[in-house]
Image (cartoon, rainbow, N blue to C red):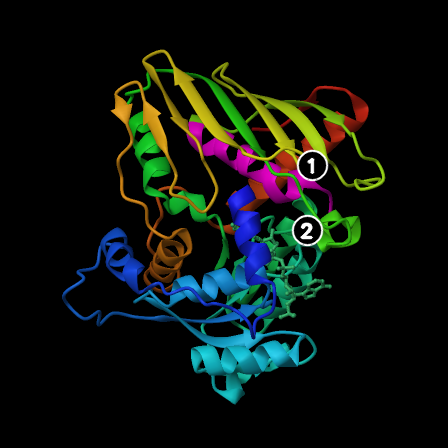
Amino acid sequence: MNNRRKFLQHLTGGIAALPFLSLNSFATTGAEASGSSPELPYAGPVLRVAIMGLGGYGTMVAEAMRACKKAKLVGVISGTPAKINAWQTRYHIPEKNCYNYENFDKIKDNPDIDAVYVITPNALHKEQAIRVARAGKHVICEKPMALNAKEAQEMIDACKKANVKLLVGYRMHFEPKTLEIIRMRKAGELGKVQFFQGLTGFAIGDPGQWRLNKALAGGGAMMDIGIYSVNGARYMTGEEPVWVTAEETKTDPAKFREGVDETIQFQLGFPSGAVASCLSTYSMNFLDRFFVLGTGGFAELQPATNYGPIQGKTHKGPLTALHVPHQTVQMEEMSDIILQNKTPIVPVDGEEGLKDLKIIDAIYQAAKTGKKVPLSG
Ligand code: NDP
């Protein structure tokens, strides 16, 4: 994640000065990964997307979408007029597809936008996603989808009521080496899964950023990076946890104020008897490792969740699947999920986001009370 942060810091240095990445070299691998032929022009449906929140990650998604065939950036929603202007030029976005946070409900009258990708600070996701749903547009929302399970449920209900799809930006669910381990686990090649270890963290910089503001972030490292270990524990074991224990440590209470977790160690217990041991932190760099162990073998990824290339091996040898830009493949796949009702190997719907937030709620409760917290599984 350190590299990711450095990359994002670089990107957010000012849009006007951005040395925008060329993703041309990714186009072929993106097409391969999405199963479409690099030779034949794509003639199927295209998901027309507006990005809400033109920050570091929004910029990365926009650049990655240049290589998409099945998804196209057609609109923006932003509180910063200068960014809107820059994005209009950069991505050929017409004035009629530009909105701000006050007027974006009007998107309901715009037939040229199918979906809105919400990429704003965590605390804004719920209200923004619900407004998008009420405007009749499909919602793609960044992780964590909300601040807690109650909010996530409200978003799911609103999207159901509006008859639109709700997806969460879980890019690792489309990552080839991750999917190879999941395939091996499902095929029984790891035997009976007994243990998962998830270590995710990075040393966070600027103390003034929204990620360290509870009102905007909803917590600390757990909401931002620990969620990868929570999510990974579920897709690597293939089970839902039935209990949680957790311990929190803080070395810098001035930077990590009340309600903003710096480091949490947590353990999960699964119905089969498998256990997970995880670490979420904002104070250690190079922490990005998954390990899954079964009676028949093991698999490990390091890095496991950064922008890649993801590296890994199993008891059978190195994982060799090609790296593809995560956000390109994610948007290609999400186009198929939204427009063609494709079922992904690992779900990316609102229910999936809700499951993670139920566990995170329980982790916070366990860390606070020091007690083992049961989950309904
Ligand atoms: P940034 O701070 O870089 O960008 C957030 C953008 O949100 C801002 O640039 C701004 O855009 C908009 N915004 C609206 N209201 C506010 C506010 N009150 N304070 C700050 N920004 C505001 O954050 P990131 O892009 O890094 O993160 C955004 C979301 O994406 C988070 O939920 C994060 O967890 C997620 N994320 C996911 C990643 C992944 O790999 N899946 C990686 C990184 C982030 P504008 O000026 O256009 O209004």
Give the percent coordinates (x, y) of residue 200.
Answer: 56, 34
Comparing 151 with 69, the one in front is 69
Amino acid beneath label 2: Glu
**Disc assigned to residue 116:** none
SS at badge 1: helix
Instruction: Give the dominant element type of the magenta stretch: helix, strand or loop.
Output: helix
- Write the residue at 30% across / 58% down: 26
Ligand 1 near label 2 (Cβ, under 8 Å)? no
Quadrant placement of the C terminus: top right
- Write the residue at 32% across / 66% down: 70
Q: Is residue 77 left or right of residue 35?
A: right
Comparing 295 with 256, the one in front is 256
Between discs 1 and 2, the one toward the N terminus: 2
Amino acid beneath label 1: Asp
Range shown magenta: 218-236
Query: Which quarter of the frame holds ligand 1?
Result: bottom right
**Disc assigned to residue 151:** 2
Q: Is residue 363 left or right of residue 62?
A: right
> What is the C-alpha distance between the residues marked 1 and 2?
11 Å
Q: Residues within 10 Å of mark 1 (few under 14, many from 20)?
A: some
Q: Residues within 10 Å of mark 2 (few under 14, many from 20)?
A: some
Q: Is residue 1 visible?
A: no
**Residue where numbered disc 1 is placed:** 361
- Write the residue at 37% across / 34% down: 311
Give the percent coordinates (x, y) of residue 318.
Answer: 28, 27
